[in-house]
Structures are given as structure tokens and as C-alpha cells.
Image (tube, rainbow, N blue to C red):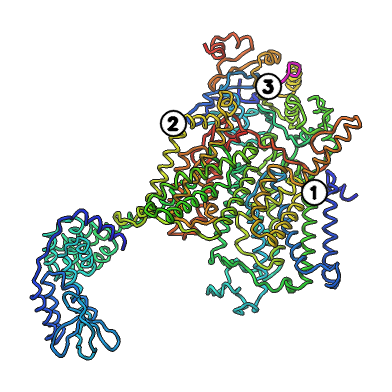
Amino acid sequence: MITRRLFAGGIDRRVLTVILLLLAAAVIVPVLHLAVPPSSPFHVPNYIVALTGKYLTYALLALALDLVWGFCGILSLGHGAFFALGGYAMGMYLMRQIGTRGVYGNPDLPDFMVFLNWKELPWYWYGFDQFWFAAIMIVLVPGALAFVFGWFAFRSRVTGVYLSIITQALTYALLLAFFRNDMGFGGNNGLTDFKDILGFNVQAPGTRAALFAASACALAFALAVTAFLTTSKFGKLMIAVRDAESRTRFIGWRPENVKLFAFVASAVMAGIAGALYVPQVGIINPGEFAPANSIEIVVWTAVGGRGTLVGPVIGALMVNGAKSWFTGVLPEFWLFALGGLFIAVTLFLPKGVVGAYDQWRRSRRDRAARKAGRPPAGEEPTPGTNDVQATPSSSVRSGPSSGGAEPQPAE
Amino acid sequence: MTFLRVLAMILTAFCAAAVSPAQADDAALRGIIAKFAETGNYSQTRAIVAELAASGDPAVAGVLNALADGDVHVRTSDNQVFITKDAGKITRVFDPLTGEALGEEPKNLFEKVKVNNSLRRAVRDALSSLTLGSADPAKRLQAARTMFASPDAASIEALDAAIGKERDAGVKAALEAARAASVLISDLPDDEKRGAVERLGARADRETLSLLKAFAERSKGDLKAAAERAVSSIESGLAFWAAAQNVWYGVSLGSVLLLAAIGLAITFGVMGVINMAHGEMVMIGAYTTFLVQEVIRGTAPWLFDWSLAIALPLAFLAAGAVGLAIERGIIRFLYGRPLETLLATWGVSLVLQQTVRTIFGPTNREVGNPSWMSGSFQLGELAITWNRLWIVVFALAVFAALLYIFNRTAWGLQMRAVTANRRMAASMGIRTPWVDAFTFALGSGIAGIAGVALSQIDNVSPNLGQGYIIDSFMVVVFGGVGNLWGTLVGAFSLGILNKFLEPYAGAVLGKILVLVVIILFIQKRPRGLFALKGRAVEA
Amino acid sequence: MGRKDTILYLDGVSVSFDGFKAINNLSLVLAEGEMRAIIGPNGAGKTTMMDIITGKTRPDTGEVFFDGDIDLTRHDEADIAVMGIGRKFQKPTVFESHSVEDNLLLALAGPRRILPAIFHRSSSAEAERVEAILQTIRLTGRRYDPAADLSHGQKQWLEIGMLLAQDPKLLLVDEPVAGMTDAETEETARLLKDIARTHSVIVVEHDMHFVRELDVKVTCLHEGSVLSEGSLDHVAADERVIEVYLGR
């Protein structure tokens, strides 16, 4: 089979299933939305298309985070920043498409610039009236930021919680910056009131369905790419860096380059997710940079199971589904539930739903094997799957130093 | 101006024996005032004003003020002079000397004593030279400042007289400055002016600067050079005060950062626990203060000035208890897994925030300042508010106390032992789980008392802690983990850096720049300012 | 002996951490193909010396040359590893969630860039090499098991196997028999002697029994410099060495 040839380690059946499901959804949901009359029980209403389309971009974002966290051991608390940057790039394109239909009817300047008495378009808005240019920027801007940030951080060997904290500071700094009116990104209100995307009305059911399909396909494609990456020798290298960074260095690899590649690839994925998110929700504002948002991405990934490919997708869909339900029924309790989820997952489900399911299945198989009188298989996943779990012992204790090192884990 | 009020209070305390001015008797004053009825032009009026001023009696201030406001009227029927207040068709009439209300009369019975701008200025000068003789040093100081702001060669004599009598050093200095300012625009000899320039050169404020600049432009030769020297010395003086102001703001911000970060320096720096709920411990402290004040307001308002002192131990206990519960309930299962700890404590922070929001509502709660924390005082050109000063003092006191606990007590020794070598400490009979728990509780409790202090300068809302968590981590990471002194230096250097960037970059951009600086700094020195070096560190 | 003929040449090397001199004017020369055992009490500077050779720590002063004329102080860990110095840590460090085979595959000499790693296809030459190393380190039977499941001694061997896969000229082996049974210790000594036939090796070890079995020249470090050098019997008879070890 082609997949066999493409994927050195053999693609996981589970990942393949999810990819096929997504591709099927990309076809079926738009059809049910557009072609089936609203009276039919099979009709998918507008808000469901928009909501699930948004969830799919979240799933893509969670998958991006999983690539760096689950496989490379970099807990980024700033992935929301890459998502938001991709979103802003798309938002700028959409703003330019408004043309003279804005409140002030200015053909060149978006409304907020007219409101702020700006006379001409700032240079960094040039080109965003072209979709191809915006598309390049969606990939380039988050990628470049990740490259610069990662180049500095990984080269100087900032790791562990230190890295997490400075990624949080990064998104916090961007949050403050984008709140400023004179940045030229709409300040507090962000970019909104979009009209067209590629000449189609963003509100139209057809466009919504197309955006949904695009999100599903993007997620399917990203799953395929990450599956390919993680099963390659590079994927093994990422896990090697996660589990014993200095060992990789002493056998001649450069962990900083491994991490940098993973980080940039992940940022680009996050940027694309953001770009698909913005036309579906119709707004992008600095709130997307809030550190709390980035930490929420972490919990999606953690709930689903980091270090697995389908885990983050399932986690993002589950948590966001729960969020929508809670905010509809018991809005005050959502934060309790989310907080509780953080605690419960780290304490009781360190491998997430997918990891816990695997463990349960394995132990059942072992029991069955014992009953049949055969020796049980190993504790760890069998070779060949790309669902490689982080072992808790991966945070290698540093030597017998006193404080001053990485904070001393107190065992 | 609040600082004046404070100064006035201090001065009053020091000058029990006030200078008593010469009092002219009532009838003589009334005689002078009556002359307003006969005045035909501005110069005559001016003469009367001068005469009133010469009486030296503060009682004439009322009529002079009224004159400047155009409220002195003459009753045409009997040529009596009154102070009047317009009230529609009628006019209310007051005694010109005592200000006693004499009833209401039709408007058309009165004729106004006319004033123009130069006359108004004359009145004002008269008033200030009058108040130079006031028994209240604050009034004298006010007068001296007014005269300094609008110098007049004619007032030199009055000032000389006042300087001769003045016993209060502060007022005297102000009087001398006013005199010097007047000398500059007089036609006195150059020697006199040179003295004045020197006298003014010792001051460092903006008014003096513009005064001397103007003088330098007018004058020539030696005098010009002297004035220019004085100008540059004032300019450098002003630059110094501006820098001092920035340093003070920076120290003030630094103390806030120190308070917020110092608990974290224990839990993160010493124990290695990433407590994302640290900010919520600060919040708990602030809400404890709110509750204490509520109870005091309801039951014993006279205790209000003690509310913070009462809140401190309670906040320590409340936040410490929550911290203890978090450690026992969650963190102890996650030791050695810093990233998981980070996530779980983030969850805790969400729950705590939402709990507080449910109980107290999402809006800001009012926490009052006790009297000893409100107001401000002047130090040179610096305005220092009491609450900021107390917070600096308090932050340093907390730091010192913590340093003492850590380095000088048995508990501190146990904490250090457990951090350095857990197994060895355990085998020597130290109960390491309890040391962990209480160290964490201590860090949380300290955050709680930080909340008491921060409730005085920040909004007490469920989001209070969120604002501090990133800054606190930055301070600890910047200062170097596991080192209390590093936290101190980190807090103050970040505070001062922030305030020095602000004038150039603006508050938000300044903050962003600081974050960028820290991010770059961590790249350069991943272990912070005060990190240990050595083989074991990176092993 | 001139620098040109040496595989490793340290001259006058010093390094201090916050005033503490971890290495103090240390000079050490290793000939090509030589195996050397380094002993010394705790804190003698053995690990710091390894850190300096592998580029992890920069010396304050002194010269460190590899293979005659490569100045090691100018290179970092990854460079030095590629140039041909392999290092085994004191605590066995392997990639726990990878299989034994994958551990070796990652260590195999070859390009160390990212793109080739992404599109890498395993070749039969690689498989043969891995097979040979597995035999050398006696782990053929555990080829597909995760490294986490290996015993402590087997992890030590796997780590040594990873060094071999790198195909280095010089191996630095830090306490290879710590925590091993007597049988494993003897096996390890045989393994190292095997390796030393084709490589230069430095072994740091506390276990005198093991050092005696290696039967090579011994250097005793103390407080960051060389205290005594020669055969084990010579060093063991040295008054100063006895004093350092027994604290008289």
C-alpha cells in the first residue's frame, strides 16, 4: 500500500480511521447542511456547522501543541499567540475585502483607522488585499516568530518550566501590544464586520459549509503530516530529545535544531488553525493572546492524551463540547468544571483518555494472556505504533546540587 | 494641595509661638474702607488698597478679596460701603469688615466700586503682603510662594521686614526666594542681583528655572554668565529630581513586585513547585482584608485604623491554610513532575477565582485606606504618598522576616536541608512531607499578607491575582531560582527598569520591553542573576 | 610524547565554579589506542574533566586537544560527538521509551541534520551494523523491547553500545559498573577490553576490583589535578594516594 511506503513505521490504524472520518465529514456535513431541507431530521443547522467548524480548528491547534509537547517535551504556554497571529493575518485580508462597505465607506482604510484619524494604510497592511499574500503571511508570520523565539530559547538551552514561563510571557507581551490602538490592528476591538472571503459572503450557508470542509480537510492533512513526521527517524529523535536531551547531544545530534523544527512546524499549524477560525467566528481580537487561552489548549491536549495523534483531536472536541454545553446550561460552573478538569486529568489521567483506553485494553489482553498461560506482554506500547507516551520519569533528576539548578523536584 | 496641608500641620506643631502682627483698631479700618465711596478713578482706589494693606490687619482681607471680585458696592443713599452678593433682582448685603450679613436690599440702590486688571493685581499683592504678617505659618508660606510666583520690585521692603521677623526656617527660605525673585526685576545694583541669582540657583524647580532664564536673556556680561550658570545648575538639579522620582516610582513598583513574588520565591524557588495559583493566594489575602474591614465597619468603626494589622495574621492563616490544602490534596502527588504541577495548580487557580466570584461577585470590592496610609508628603521635589512608602517598608520587613526564618531558625534549616538532599534529610529524622507541606503553606501565607498590602493600591476583584502571576514568575526567574536575595534584586531592578522605560516608551510598551528584556536575559543566563554554577547544576 | 601522536592532550587545564577550583592545572595525555583508568575520591574532578573534554564545560585556562590538533575548547558537545568522542554518563542514560534497536539506530554514525532524518529510510547496511553491536553488547534477544524494561546493567551496556554505534575514536566511560553484580562487572570488563582493541578509552571507576581486571595504566586525580600515575600497584602503593583515600 502507498501508506506503507510513505510511512516508515506504518501509519497507525486509528489515525487512518480519524483521517477518513474527517474527510467523510468534509463531504457529508456540507451536503446535509445545504441539500437537505431544514424540516428533515438529517438537516444540519447553521449554528452546528459553525460550531463544529470552530471545534475542528481548535483540534488542529491542539494537534499542533501535541507535536511539541507530547513528542518533543516542550510545554508551550504561548501557542495561542501563533493561532492568533494566523487569525490576524486572515483578519487583515478580510478587512481589506470590506472595501467601501464599511461604516465610513473609505475604500483604502478599515473603519477603525478612519475612526483613529489615520491618513493612510500602514506599510504592514500592504498586500493583504490579495488572498495569496495573506495565505503566505498566515504561514510565515507565526513560523518566523516561532523560529526567532525558538532559535534564541533552544540555543541557550532554556528548558522545562522556564521555557513554559517565557512562552507565556511571549503571548502576554503580544496581548499587551495588540491592545494598543497605535499598533494598527484595531486595538481592543480587533478586526471584525467581515463581508467577503474570496468573493463569497462569509455569512452565506455555502461559505460556511465550505469553511467547515476546509477545516476538516486541513485537520486530516495535518494528521497525515504529523503521523508521517512522528513515525520517521525525526520523530524518534523528537522523543529522544524529550526523554534524554543531553544523551542526544552527546551522540552528535543538535537537540536545539530538532526542537526548532518541531516548534516552527507546530507554529505554522497553529497559524493555519487560526486563519480557518477567524472567518467562521467572524472576529479576531487581542483576547486570543490571553495566557489563559493558551493554557486551555494544553488541557485539550492533556485530556485527549498527549504523545498520541488522535488524542488532541478527541480532547479538543470533548472539552469544547462540554464548554458549549456548560455555558448554555450552567454558565457559572464552567470555570469550576474546567479547573477541576485540569486537576483531575493531571492526577488521574496523566495519559489522557486515549492513553487510559490503551492501558485498559492492554491490561485486559495481559489478563487474558495470563489466563491462557502465556507470559504477559511488556508494559510499554508495542513497537510500531506511533502512540508513544511520555514516561513520568522523563524529567530526569539533576545531580545532588542544592537550589539554583532547575527547580529541584521534591520527589 | 495636600502636601501643603501636611506641611501646614507640621509647621503649626513646631511654631507654637506665632508672630503677632500689629493690629490697627476697628474704627481706623472702617475709616479707610469708607474712602471707597469717594474714589473717582483707579489710582485713587489703588491708594486706598495700599492704605488697607499697610494696616497689616488680616481683617481687611475680606473686603480686598471682594474688591477684586467686583463685589464692593456703595449705597448711593448714604454713601456707605458694603460687600454685596448678587441674588437676582435683590442683593444681599454684608459688613465690609466682619462679613456679617445685613439683610437684602434692591439692587438698584448700589453702585459698584470699579476695578481693572492692574488693580486686581495690586489687590492680590496687597493680600499676600498682608498674609506675610499672618499668625499662621502656612498662610505666610502661601503668601511667600504667591509673591515668588509674581515678583514685584515694590514688595522688596515688605519682604525684608518679613524676613527679619520670620523664625520659621521653611517660611524664611520661601520669603528669601520671593525677595530674590523680586530683586531680579528691580533696578537695584548688580551686586544685589548677583546675590539673588546665587540664592535662586540653589533651588531646583521649574518656576525658578523660567525666572532665571528670562533674567539671563535680559541681562548682560557678568550677571548674564552668573544667571546662565545658575540655570544649568538648576537644570541638572531638576534632572536629578526627575531621576529620583523615577527611582522612587521604580522602588515603589519593585516593592509591589517583591511582595507578589516573595511567596513564589519559596514555593517555586526553594521547593521547585510551579504554583500557578499563587496569584489567587494574594487575592485571598486581599479579600480577607475586605472582610475584616466590613466587620469593623459594622461593629467597631473606631478600630478602622487597625484593620490592616488585624487582617495581616488572618490573611496569613487563610492563604496558608488554602496552600496547605493544595499541597496535601494535589501537589504532593505531583512532585518531580513540574509541568503537571503547573497544569494542576492552574486548575486550582480557576476554581479559586470562580469561588470568590460566586461568593463576592465579579465586581471590585471597596477596601479603604486607614488614615495613616492616606495622604502624602513632599521630599525635595518628590511627592511621596504614605501608602506607597508603607508598602515599601512592609515589603522589606517581610523580606527580612523571611530571610530570618530561612537562615536562622530550626525550621528554616530543615527546609534548606530537605531542598538540598531529601533522602539524607529524611534519614536524619526530618519529616520531609511535613516540611514540604509547611514550606508551601508559608509561601502561600506570605502571598496572603502581600494581598493585604496590595489591597491598598489595587482593585480587589477576583482577577487580582492574575495580574501578578506573570510578573512574579519573571521576578523569580530573573533574580535566580532558589535565592531570596535574587528575588529582592530582581524585583527592584525590574521595577526601576520598568519606570525608567515608561517615560520614553509609554506604560504598555515599557512593560512589553521589560518582558522582551527578560526573555532575552533568560536566553543569556538561563539560571537568572544569582544562579549557582557548576557541574551538578546542568547534569 | 609530542601532541601530534596523542588522541587526547590536556595541558594546564583549570576551571572553577564560584571560586571553587574543580580542576586545577590538570595535565593528562592519552596515546592513540590506549585504555586508561581514572580513579580518585569524590570531588576529585573526574566528571568535570569529562565535561571539559566533551565540550559541556569551558576551561578557564589550559589547552585541550583531540587527535593531535583539534582544539576541543572551540567546539560544542554535538560537534565533538560527531568528531569522534563518545561519552557514557555516570547514570545510565538511554531513550527509555524507544526500543533497544531504535536507541542504536539513533546513535549510528551518519548525517546529523534534520531533513535527512525526516526522509530517512533504513538500509540493510544499518541493520547489519546494529546486529553486530547487539551481539557485542549481548542484547540481541532484547532487540525490540523498550529500553525502559532493561535491567540497570543492561542499560549500561546499551549505552556503551550506543557509543560504539557512533563509531568514535575515543570513548569516555563514567563508572560503567556502578550498581552491577559481580558477574556483570566481569562481563563489562571483558566488553571494555574488547572495545579497547580498536578504540582509545578512558574509564572512570571507583571499583578497584574492576580496575585491576582492566589491567591498564591508572591515573589518580585529587582536588582537580593528577596525584599519581602508573600501574595500579604503583598507584596503590603511593603514600599520597593512600592518604587521600583513607584520610590520614
Q: What range is drawn magenta here?
A: C180-184
For mark 2, give the secondary structure.
helix
Find residue A93 and report its horizontal and vertical position in percent: 67, 68
Give the image quarter of residue A326.
bottom right
Residue C181 painted magenta: yes
Q: Which mark is residue B408?
A: 2
**Disc 1 marks which residue?**
A228
Residue at x-position 9% and y-position 66%: B22
For mark 3, give the secondary structure.
loop
Give the image quarter of residue C3.
top right
Q: Nearer the viewer, mark 1 or mark 3?
A: 3
Residue at x-position 25% and y-position 81%: B85
Find residue A32 and report its horizontal and vertical position in percent: 85, 67
Q: Nearer the viewer, mark 2 or mark 1?
A: 2
**Disc 3 marks which residue?**
C178
Find residue C201 and report its horizontal and vertical position in percent: 68, 23
Q: Nearer the viewer, mark 2 or mark 3?
A: 2
Q: Amino acid at mark 1?
A: Phe
Quarter of the picture holding the C terminus of chain B? top right
Asked whether residue B244 is in view, the answer is no
Q: Say whether residue C145 is left or right of residue B120.
A: right
Please give the chain letter of the residue carrying mark 1: A
Marks 2 and 3 sit apart, C-alpha to C-alpha, by 39 Å
Residue at x-position 86% and y-position 70%: A40
Quarter of the picture holding the N terminus of chain B? bottom left
Please give the chain letter of the residue carrying mark 2: B
Please name the predominant secondary structure of the magenta segment in the image.
helix
Please give the chain letter of the residue carrying mark 3: C
Q: Amino acid at mark 3?
A: Ala
